[in-house]
Amino acid sequence: MLQIQQLRDEKERIILGLEKKFVLNASEQVEKAILLDNERKEIQSNLNKFQEEVNKLSAEVGQLMKSGQKEQAEAIKLQVAGKKGEIKTLEEKTAVLEDSLFNALVVLPNVPHVSVPNGRTPEENELVESWGESKNMPEGSLPHWDLIAKYDIIDFENGNKVSGAGFPFYKGKGAKLQRALINFFLDEAEKAGYNEMQPPIVINKESGYGTGQLPDKDGQMYHIQEDGLYMIPTAEVPITNYFRDTILKETELPKKCVGYTPCFRREAGSWGAHVRGLNRLHQFDKVEIVQIAHPDQSYLILEDMRKYVQGLLEKLNLPYRVLRLCGGDMSQTSALTYDMEVYSGAQARWLEVSSVSNFETFQSNRLKLRAKSEETKKTFLLHTLNGSALALPRIVAALLENNQTPEGIRIPDVLVPYTRFEWIN
């Protein structure tokens, strides 16, 4: 969430940034928040004055009672009672204004970084770099959903029977490939200095607000109404919320965490060939990396995280490209996002497998996640970053399609120690 002081100090920059994300009436929304805060401040100032007067009069009552001037003391008590009534009225107005200000701020997205390109659609994202050959497969190559059926490694039909569409069963070598990828990604993260965590897969409402899924993605999350809990859309949410209401030492930074979880997304309204098979699921597995960083270091760390994810794709020998998302294609919470897409030979299309993002102080302001300066001893908001490292469904789809041969599907060399087999056939 943007800070009200940011809106005051950097109003023009923020309005331009919000317009880059195609926020309707950005200027009016910013002005509304500032006006609400002005009104809140004025009432708070009056409230403070009334409180000071009450305190002063209350002290006088004590002195008068001690000196036996009971009648004068009772008269002042009546004044105190009247002012306390006015204080209560002002406190109620303040509470209403604070709620209105919160509601005005919570719907505003993060301001994009200066390097974010202009644009509204994915076609306007900026190509940063690419790796590997993205050639179409030979004639007769199959898309992954046909390969899955051919080798009987994932069962969509029984998943649909048991849970519904988008909840497949992985079985045999399909299940082992899933487990191999998870362990490979976790081991690689450990080598890169990430501390492994096994977080809860349900969160409360406060956690959803903390990382910005609420209220923005309320309709996309599975909600357990009886308990007020939500199924997580990604491990980012519980891992980042682990640091909610925390003051870290500068010497502790950066905090590097990794976690594997199943992820749950309703994906309401998704349909068509582009979501066939593993391309889009309601439940899927993902390994997520999270960093809590000093503001001065976060963009260097973002580049390191991007290169780390690219390294995983290269080890799997999957051709990929890196895109810097344009303003209109970014999430509400992100200041800068890189998408990594792998090339699916059989589908002849690019599949997003990772997003790596810097949220600057947008999440940490909601989370009250700060550090104490070693020099000034003052606290300051930290920057939060995360990335998929990696999401499994489309990785599996690309591995199956790009490694198919007449003899079967060849497992990448780096995964063989984990799968303990070289072929799916």
Image (cartoon, grey):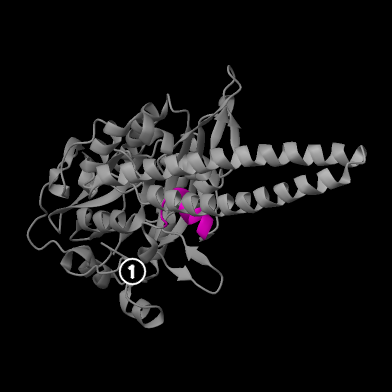
Rendering quarter of residue 65: top right
Which quadrant does the N terminus fall into? top left
Closer to the camera in the image, 327 or 286: 327
Q: Relative to 263, is 372 above or below?
A: above
List the single residue furthest toward the top.
375
Majority secondary structure of the magenta segment? helix
On the rendered structure, is 403 left or right of 96? Answer: left
Task: Write down the residue under mark 1.
Answer: 153
Instruction: Give the percent coordinates (x, y) of residue 229.
Output: 52, 65
Picture residue at 38% right of the left edge, 50% below the top: 104
Q: Is residue 314 left or right of residue 68?
A: left
Left or right, 292 with respect to 83, comes to left
Residue appearing at x 71%, y 47% in the figure: 79
User: Residue 212 location in percent, x, y?
Assistant: 42, 51
Circle 1 Cα neighbour tier, 10 Å, few/some/many (<14 / 14–19 / ≥20): some
Front residue (pair 346, 77): 77
Kindly tell me whether residue 312 is visible in this rendering: no
Residue 267 x/y as whole percent: 31, 65
The image shows residue 10, relative to residue 219, as above or below, that is above
Name the residue type under label 1.
Ile
* Part of the protein shown in magenta: 205-214
Judge whether residue 108 is colored magenta.
Answer: no
Q: Residue furthest left?
A: 139
Helix, strand or loop at disc 1?
Answer: loop
Image height of 322 relative to 372, above or below: below
Q: Position of residue 167 (x, y in %)?
A: 37, 71
Residue at the front extreme of this rendering: 71
Please state, as top left, top right, bottom left or bottom right, where the C terminus lies in the image. bottom left
Residue 141 seen in render:
yes
